[in-house]
Image (spheres, rainbow, N blue to C red):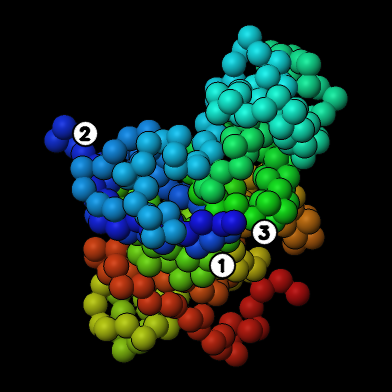
């Protein structure tokens, strides 16, 4: 049966340093929730508090309305998987998975049946007699997960479980873990600083920084509507362009003066900063264009184009095929259109969407033919 977790007004300090500051969070039964944020944001500390490996200075943690803080770690029914596996090197795969069951003095027949069931689940039943040193990183992480699942936990906690693995193995394990979670339906929290990992795995994402929760929601909702400039920047690359708004028109500031318009926004008059994703920077080769390609680099299937106009710098991402088809090269001149973006005020708050300008007839007539 899946468990609801209620976290209320959690504070954790280490000396004069506040690691968690009035954190409030609800995790629904069977939910796969990602704690996403930079190093030092308090993600792992929160996980340790839930597991009972640390204790808060103030606040409440409930499992299904029962006080979890009043229970010892082994009484909470929590499975914990660490980044670096923490397997017993002198034990075989079978013995590692069986360890927690034996500590709880489970009958031998029950231990054997449960371990064999889990080894089949993680697709390592043929490696039961091997030692951790004889396994790959991905195999060790699966053994660590099986060991955490052996006690049939109410809650599963994963602390950067794929951080020590190479990119290909991480990708494969993410898919495997998502399928496993859908099959087992255990309330799961995992810590990561990898946006792609969080978005691919999680039902819901919680963005943390400086010991506080900045935003929570589905991956799509957070990416499309970041609450502030920090979240926008953390969730992917952005072009930051100083702007001034006048009568709903967003103008860039170039050379200290009001320059060309890049869009419209229902924003008050005054200065702001536009955050524009590279895929919202639309480029077209044009002999009369005001923009110039200052750098062109290939990342495989995509190409990254750095464009400049006076002191304005922006990056666009297009397909490598589009670069070849258009004949785009460094120092080429361009027309650039911003197809979307978000305005933030001087404090990085109060997001307002930017709508693309409707092209004029003259603009429609420019470009390579």
User: Going by the image, does 106 lie left or right of 254?
Assistant: right
Write the residue at 52% across / 31% down: 82
The spot of residue 301 in percent (x, y) is 74, 50
**In terms of secondary structure, where does tag 3 sit?**
strand
Write the residue at 29% across / 63% down: 348
Q: Which residue is mark 1?
A: 220
The spot of residue 141 in percent (x, y) is 65, 30
Q: Gap in Å between the C-alphas at discs 2 and 3? A: 47 Å
User: Going by the image, does 302 lie left or right of 57?
Assistant: right
Q: How many marks?
A: 3
Sequence-earlier tag: 2 or 1: 2
Choose top left, top right, bottom left or bottom right for residue 48: top left
Residue 318, which numbered label?
3
Residue 14, which numbered label?
2
Write the residue at 55% across / 28% down: 104
| Label 2 CA crowd tier, 10 Å (few <14, some 14–19, many 20+) | few
Sequence-earlier tag: 1 or 3: 1
**Residue occupying the far left of the picture:** 16
Q: Do the residues bearing badges 2 and 3 touch, measured as CB atoms within 8 Å?
A: no
Q: Is residue 30 visible?
A: yes
The spot of residue 241 in percent (x, y) is 38, 63
**In terms of secondary structure, where does tag 1 sit?**
helix
Nearest to the observer: residue 295 or residue 76: 76
């Amino acid at each position: 049966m899946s468990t609801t977790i209620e976290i209320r007004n959690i504070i954790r300090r280490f000396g004069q340093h506040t690691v968690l500051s009035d954190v409030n969070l609800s995790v629904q039964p069977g939910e796969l929730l990602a704690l996403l944020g930079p190093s030092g944001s308090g993600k792992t500390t929160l996980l340790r508090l839930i597991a009972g490996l640390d204790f808060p200075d103030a606040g409440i943690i409930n499992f299904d309305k029962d006080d979890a803080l009043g229970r010892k770690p082994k009484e909470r029914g929590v499975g914990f998987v660490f980044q670096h596996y923490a397997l017993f090197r002198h034990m075989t795969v079978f013995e590692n998975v069986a360890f927690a069951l034996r500590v709880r003095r489970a009958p031998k027949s029950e231990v054997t049946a449960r371990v064999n069931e889990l080894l089949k689940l993680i697709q390592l039943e043929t490696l039961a007699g091997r030692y951790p040193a004889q396994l790959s990183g991905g195999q060790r992480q699966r053994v660590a997960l099986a060991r955490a699942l052996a006690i049939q936990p109410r809650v599963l906690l994963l602390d950067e479980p794929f951080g020590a693995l190479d990119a290909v193995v991480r990708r494969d394990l993410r898919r495997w873990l998502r399928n496993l979670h859908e099959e087992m339906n255990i309330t799961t929290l995992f810590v990561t600083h990898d946006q792609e990992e969080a978005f691919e795995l999680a039902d819901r994402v919680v963005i943390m920084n400086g010991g506080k929760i900045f935003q929570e929601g589905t991956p799509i909702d957070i990416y499309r509507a970041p609450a502030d400039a920090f979240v926008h920047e953390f969730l992917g690359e952005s072009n930051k362009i100083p702007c001034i708004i006048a009568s709903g028109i967003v103008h860039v500031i170039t050379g200290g003066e009001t320059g060309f318009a890049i869009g419209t926004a229902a924003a008050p008059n005054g200065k702001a900063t536009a955050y524009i994703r590279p895929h919202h920077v639309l480029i077209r080769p044009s002999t009369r264009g005001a923009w110039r390609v200052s750098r062109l680099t290939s990342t495989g299937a995509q190409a990254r184009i750095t464009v400049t106009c006076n002191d304005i710098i922006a990056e666009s991402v297009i397909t490598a095929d589009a670069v070849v088809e258009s004949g785009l090269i460094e120092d080429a001149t361009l027309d650039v259109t911003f197809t979307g973006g978000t305005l933030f005020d001087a404090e990085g708050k109060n997001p307002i969407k930017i709508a693309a300008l409707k092209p004029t007839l003259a603009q429609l007539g420019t470009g390579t033919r």
